[in-house]
Image (cartoon, grey):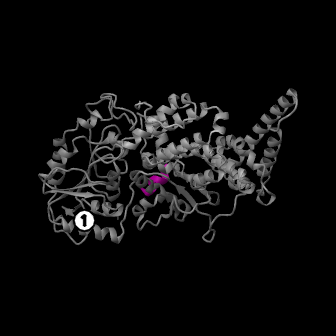
Amino acid sequence: MWDADTQHIDAPAQMPPPLFRDQSWVEFQAAIREFQRNATSASGFTLTRPKDFSLAVAHLRNFLRRVPAIFRHSQNEFFGLILSSIETLERSPIRFYPNELLRLHLVKAEVLIECNEPAQALVLLRHVAERPYLIEGDIGHMRDVLRLQQVALMMLGRKDEAAATAWRGMFVCGHVSPIEAAQAFRVFADALHLSPAHQMPSKALPRLLAYLARIRTELRREAGSRITRRLRGLIQRGVDRVGAVIAAIIALAPRHLSGLPEAIDQSQGESPVLVTRAMGGIGDIIMMMPGLRALARQTRQPVHFATKKSFFPLFAENSDVLLHDIDGPPLDVRRFRAWYDLSFCPAGRYESRHRPNVKKGRVKLFAGGMGISEKEISAVGLRPHVEFSEISKRAAATFFAEHGLDGQQPVIAVQAFSRETYRDYPRMDALIEKLAARYKVVVFHHVAFPLPSHPNIVPAFAQPLGNAFATFARCSLAVCADSSFFHVAAALDMPTVALFGPTDGTVRSEHHRKVHIVSSRHTFKCMPCWRNEDTPCQLTGTMQSACMMAIDENEVTDLVDRLLAKITPTVQTGGHCTMYRGVALSTAPP
């Protein structure tokens, strides 16, 4: 727990001092001070985890819940201090975790609405409210964003927009599951009953839903006697149940039962399909490619794929998708034939339910999340395909020429760190130095970090994504942990020596045809544990994985030697592929 002193907690003098000695407030302020230090690991990633921010926001919620309403409403300074603290937290590393930042923004929006500042709350929530596919795996966040938006709109007198928000909320919740649609009726009924005639869907069921919302709103009015109030409550519960059933039925077949607008483009026949993914990582995006390819074949047209713009270089020359910037202009998900929201990660759900007995790889899991069967994914193949733009290829060629890497000596590519530190190999620096004694070694990372001093070690730090992977593609062999470059190597069909510990190398590499797994599984009976960054190693009690520490760098270098010793260099052509005895060690996909 954070240092919970109160020395630097400022509170207006006229406020009751005990209020700001509340333990939740003290913990919240201590957390802010800790986050402002922004400690990072050796790999350059913040050490603060999402659970830390969730705990801080929970402290803030608990504090606000315990403050008497009469005091909140009579003290403007109180809200000023709360908002100031929230803005300080917004500048911390919480900005690297969109889900936790949204959790904080929901609290801030509630405070702004209570301060009678609905316009500011609307501005705060608009970006996510118009793009519900940005929400990562938490249907509660989705409901809360749209609920607070409709409240702010009603406070501003914009009832038609509030009703439109309610209908959109019913759709996106129903898309997650019919059960969520049933629960959403109670959340959005207040605004549904405001639907004007021109906004009313044409189908019978949604019209009935709006009628039930009107009845429900009327029943919630204060009644005189206790008997009347109880009777109204019983009728309201009945209306809620009927409305929930109707909402669930609509969610089962929304295009046929809800009167949705026409598809965005019918010039080429059937309407398109949308796939969305709000977060990374790069490895997951690459493992989605076979499923996207199968879906494009199934629908006989490119798949509309919304993801972060920073990932676009991975799809250069890829005709299976039409890319959308997920933070760009809002997409009306109701206008697509189907919407597969991979921000509700099917792979994460499966692995959390089945660990440590995880048997399915993420390529198949992501494909299943897009409605692709195992037969269909097997027909197109599990291996992803990555191409690079001409600009990236030229940048890679220039990098190789500048560092004298175009000779006959094999070039080893090393990704030094994974995004998740529990997968890292702790003695990577020693391994790099041993490899450099025999070969040229190019070390990739998104930020610079200290490397052993050796003329054969070439840093490739902070390169643009496309350039980094195009440079990686020119190398002879890859050495990495369970990380993004491991999956890029699979897409490039590049021989890879992969270091695995907490995750299962066999399952993770089902799409990689030329992988050689190094692990201590024969020694550690707890492998694979499939733990995550928030779960300590059961053997060490720390974030460092004992199974990764046990890997001998000499065994890794010996394996690299054996793989390359079988190969006799031949003349290198003008391409970026080095050929040895007719075997392509590094090549672009066919």
- Tell me: residue 264, above or below residue 40: below
Q: Return the x and y of residue 224 as percentages of the image width and height.
A: 88, 32
Along the horizontal axis of the image, is 457 left or right of 147?
left
Along the horizontal axis of the image, is 232 left or right of 136?
right
Q: Which residue is mark 1?
A: 577
Between 245 and 561, the residue placed more toward the observer is 245
Q: Return the x and y of residue 121 as percentages of the image width and height.
A: 61, 50
Mark 1 residue type: Cys
Along the horizontal axis of the image, is 548 left or right of 159?
left
- Tell me: residue 474, above or below residue 182: below
Between 411 and 57, the residue placed more toward the observer is 57
Split into 4 quadrants, where in the image is the N terminus? top left
Q: Quadrant of residue 409?
A: bottom left
Numbered range of the magenta stretch: 373-381
Q: Return the x and y of residue 247 as percentages of the image width and height.
A: 72, 45
The residue located at (58%, 39%) in the rendering is: 78
Number of numbered discs on residues: 1
Split into 4 quadrants, where in the image is the C terminus? bottom left
The residue located at (46%, 67%) in the rendering is: 319
Magenta stretch contains residue 7: no
